[in-house]
Image (cartoon, grey):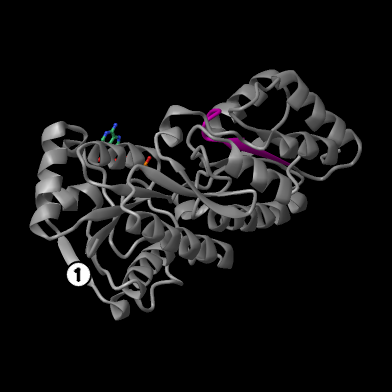
Amino acid sequence: MKRIGVLTSGGDSPGMNAAIRAVVRKGIFHGLEVAGIYQGYQGLIEGKIETLEARDVGDIIQRGGTKLYSARCEAFKTEEGQLKAIEQMKKHGLEGLVVIGGDGSYQGAMALTKHGFPCVGVPGTIDNDIPGTDYTIGFDTALNTVIEAIDKIRDTATSHERTFIIEVMGRDAGDLALWAGLSGGAETILIPEDDFDLDEIIDRLEKGRKRGKRHSIIIVAEGVMNGNALADLITSKADIETRVSVLGHVQRGGSPTARDRVLGSLFGAHAVEVLLQNIGGRAVGMKNHQVVDYDMTKAFTTKHETDMSLYTLSKELSI
Ligand code: ADP
């Protein structure tokens, strides 16, 4: 293998730049040429492909977002789109591709691999929802953004003796809500991995108030319901006034934490090592603190497992 490509696809996440930098520089370390593909699969079909030198990925490790931009591309879901993409890659002399993105992007990468073009996946999403890896790039930064917000909301919640509902991202996974709730000291955490009991939530709020608690923080994962809907449910059943804060896309941005920069660097570098063996259809991840690679199909045919011991612990601690 002499020349490989790298792209970012789907939802962006902080730390993707560290992964791009690692792919480019690890590739160069091994004597490869590395090309960046702009705007994900859309740019691949359109041939937005440029060779990246070591200096081209300088000064990006500390930046959120992705230098290569991202996109969603419906055309790429068709075989016709995929074949066009392969044609472009052949035209630009590429022999392998690193795809940094979520499970949707992995499905695209697997399709290319099945057409004979080796791809390796790197997990980039704030949702931490990719099966086969304990962590994804961007999760830690998003988590820190959320707890910064919780801390600030807690100040005003205490001053005014209020109950706050904070809606956090995570798609169908509760990881962000759970980790943020535990580290932000939330009284109640609602995640899609468990049913919730409205009466129990209300009971907790009322008991807390009687014990002299000046505030309550409820974290709700977007995969459960939106924050306003939860507020309506609570007020329909009890005389409890709530304030809702939907954190939204701030959770996607910002300078990556050290942890996400390290993860991005480790994953990007490992992806190049895998491609160098001419192996496609693999995904890179972290399992029990070790960098691993595994069959990429696992990432979209199995279900991500949230660490439910944290959920149990959060309940035990939020008394
Ligand atoms: P993420 O990678 O963050 O999960 P998406 O699900 O939006 O984000 O996927 C990103 C892109 O990957 C899509 O816009 C599409 O181009 C490609 N993709 C998603 N699903 C498939 C699929 N089943 N087959 C081929 N390509 C896909």
| Residue at 63% in and 58% down | 148
| Residue at 65% in and 52% down | 150
Location of residue 248 with respect to 17 vertically, above or below: above
Q: Quadrant of residue 17?
A: bottom left
Asked whether 94 or 217 is in front, the reply is 94
Asked whether 6 or 63 is in front, the reply is 6
Location of residue 134 with respect to 54 vertically, above or below: above
Q: Which residues are magenta?
A: 217-225
Q: Residue furthest right?
A: 211
Q: Position of residue 208 (x, y in %)?
A: 85, 35
Q: Quadrant of residue 173?
A: top right
Q: Position of residue 35 (x, y in %)?
A: 22, 65
| Residue at 10% in and 52% down | 88
Per the image, is 231 magenta? Answer: no
Q: Position of residue 154 (x, y in %)?
A: 71, 52
| In this picture, residue 52 sits left or right of residue 18 | left
Q: Position of residue 161 (x, y in %)?
A: 77, 45
| In this picture, residue 57 sits left or right of residue 190 | left
The number of discs equals 1
| Residue at 65% in and 25% down | 194
Per the image, is 224 magenta? Answer: yes
Q: Is mark 1 within 8 Å of ligand 1?
A: no
Q: Residues within 10 Å of mark 1 (few under 14, many from 20)?
A: some
Asked whether 161 or 127 is in front, the reply is 127
| In this picture, residue 13 sits left or right of residue 88 | right
- Considering the numbered disc 1 on the image, is that residue within a helix, a strand or a loop? strand
Ligand 1 quadrant assignment: top left
Could you tell me the amino acid type at mark 1?
A: Thr
The residue beneath circle 1 is: 51
